[in-house]
Image (cartoon, helix red, strand yellow):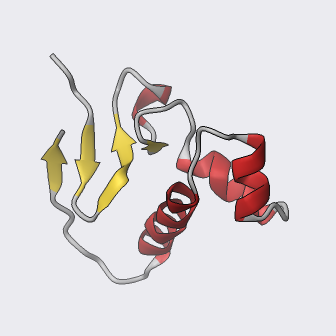
Amino acid sequence: MERKTQMTGFDRITFDPNIMGGRACIRGMRITVAMIINLISNGMSTEEIVHEYPYLEPEDIQQALRYVALLADESIRELELVSA
């Protein structure tokens, strides 16, 4: 039985307790949103990240940024999780 879930509006961000301890990952891969944000915060561009990690797509990077922006928003929102 697959346990992967994703958030409504974030089709590239997945959560699976069997992958990276359930942390937010990109499309079920062992690439966490935190790793992508860390690369960006250390000066890498989207093009550089995709070059270094060719299995990622620019849309993955943009969605990771949108996800983190949502988390950093000071307002409280109820998120609906959908099973994949």
Residue 27's x, y, as percent? Answer: 41, 41
Residue at 51 percent across and 55 percent down: it is 60
Residue 54's x, y, as percent? Answer: 67, 40
Residue at 49 percent across and 32 percent down: it is 29
Q: In the visual, does 55 lie left or right of 29?
A: right
Q: In the visual, does 72 lie left or right of 11?
A: right
- Count of marks, rendered view: 0
Q: In the visual, does 80 lie left or right of 55?
A: left
Residue 19's x, y, as percent? Answer: 44, 25
Looking at the rendered image, the quarter that the C terminus falls into is top left
Residue at 33 percent across and 59 percent down: it is 10
Residue located farthest toward the top when viewing the structure as drawn: 1
The answer to whether 47 is drawn above or below residue 18 in the figure is below
Residue 78: quarter of image = bottom left
Looking at the rendered image, the quarter that the N terminus falls into is top left
The answer to whether 14 is drawn above or below residue 78 in the figure is above
Residue 53: quarter of image = top right
Residue 63's x, y, as percent? Answer: 47, 63
Residue located farthest toward the bottom when viewing the structure as drawn: 75
Residue at 81 percent across and 60 percent down: it is 44
